[in-house]
Image (cartoon, rainbow, N blue to C red):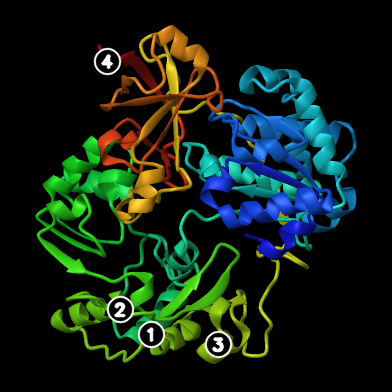
Amino acid sequence: MTNSIAEIRNVGCLLVIGSNTTENHPVISLEMKEAVRQNGAKMIVADPRKIDLVDYADIWLNHKPGTDAALINGLIHVIIKEGLHDKKFIEERTEGFEELAEVVKRYTPEMVEKITGVPAKDIEAAARMFATAETAAIFYAMGITQHTTGTDNVKALANLAMLTGNVGKENTGVNPLRGQNNVQGACDMGALPNVLPGYQPVTDDKVRQKFETLWGVKLPSQPGLTIMEIINGAIEGKIKALYIMGEDPLTSDPNVNHVREGIEALDFLVVQDIFLSEVGKHADVVLPGVSFAEKEGTFTNTERRVQKVRKAISPIGEALPDWEIILDLFKRAGYKQNYRSPEEIFTEITKLTPQYGGITYARLEKEGGLQWPCPHPDHPGTKYLHKDSFTRGKGKFFPIEFINPNELPDSEYPYLLTTGRVLYHWHGGNLSRRSEGLKEIYPEGLIEINPVDAGVIGVKDGELVVVESRRGKVTGKVKITPKAATGIVFMTFHFIEVLANLLTNDALDPVAKIPEYKVCAVKIRKVA
């Protein structure tokens, strides 16, 4: 997030797009509701489903899945046409405005209505509401990124924020709500194929030299592969071994039949996890890690806040903290590193990662958490980013053209499937489905469809249907609900018995290489 969770209550207008915040980020959703109920904030919700936040919204932009860029361009068109853009901010802090303005001329509210299904009057009203607010902030999640045009969608949102001057100051910003509790920290530490810790490019000779000197090894000079590229490489025989830690691609990756083919093609598979996962059943070696309650260290959350994690209980059975397992593997592989504690590892992180340079365990104990960038010991941490300038100097507008999703409904597969989570379960369910209380509340995977579609299919609530895509099929119970729009099917991916990712499309965004989880074509039939 460019800004902080504590700022949400004071935002004048919230645009929530591609985020079912109440079920995926419930604490943050409470802040949003407080902004509306207590402080009179305006809220615009853009989502294909009637999510809980719609009840708090002034405007609901009920757009078709995969049409986000067109919708955002429509908002920008209205703002420029009506002269509501922040001319001073654009002049002083940005470049490329003229190119953006030229492209969005075509995205009239009427044209955008045809693409998205959102009435033109609602597009106009939302644009005016966002642009005229004293402060406005954008909040998005994987409903924006998990598309073949995910990178374009994010750029379009950045365009909207810069256009209205709602970035680089308090109570504004472009705020991605990260999908897992420490995914921000994992990315900060270089768990990406093209960067080392601190988002320092592996292709930069000076960067590599810094790490090579401290670590005493030679590092690759070219980026590695993303998850789906690794699976394809395994099928092609280029990837022979895989080490999977805290992840289950056989539930959470798209086109699971294809993923299974890649896993089974490996010569050697190691899985490190706290419970035996689906992919763990295919492993040659399983290494028992520990839960958050059994280890020390730090997590970095969605607002860039580094926080200490303290051990509540000792590791159970033969399980070990992840750092100890990895250190043991280092030694057995002949690489001599003698880290003695998580704090010692964190101290090394601060030497190599500029954003963490001023953070210490002592400060975290005293201050309860610090937001990066925090480059030196006297720095207070950074509440919001881009205050005086952007990383590249001037913010750049990127003109974005709308591109259809990779796969759309047709006569054979007439429905559109989109996927997500529910409040009561987590990711592949390897942890949450072991809770008897959560299982009692939400015991099985359901297939949400609109009452109109239920009538066409001839199915009643709770009856079984088969949902089939070009990649697989699943059988599960129907939940008939007006939350689902006509022609749209919604499923979660928590349940291996009704696994949505057997159906989803593994087509990738060409830049970020993120799969298109949120849009694919399916057909549905009632089980006789």
> Tag 4, which secondary structure?
loop
> Residue flagged by tag 1: what amino acid is it?
Pro
Residue occupying image coordinates x 14% and y 52%: 281
Query: Is 395 above or below relative to 212?
Result: above
**Mark 2 residue crowding within 10 angstroms, few (<14) / some (14–19) / many (20+):** some
State the residue position of label 2. 323
> Tag 3, which secondary structure?
helix
State the residue position of label 3. 365
Residue occupying image coordinates x 62% and y 75%: 373
State the residue position of label 1. 342
**Could you give the CA–CA distance between mark 4 and mark 3, rounded to whole angstroms?**
58 Å
Which labelled disc corresponds to residue 191? none
Residue 309 image point, x, y percent: 45, 78
Q: Which of 189 and 425 is in front in this view?
A: 425
State the residue position of label 4. 527
Residue 42 is left or right of residue 138, and the answer is: right
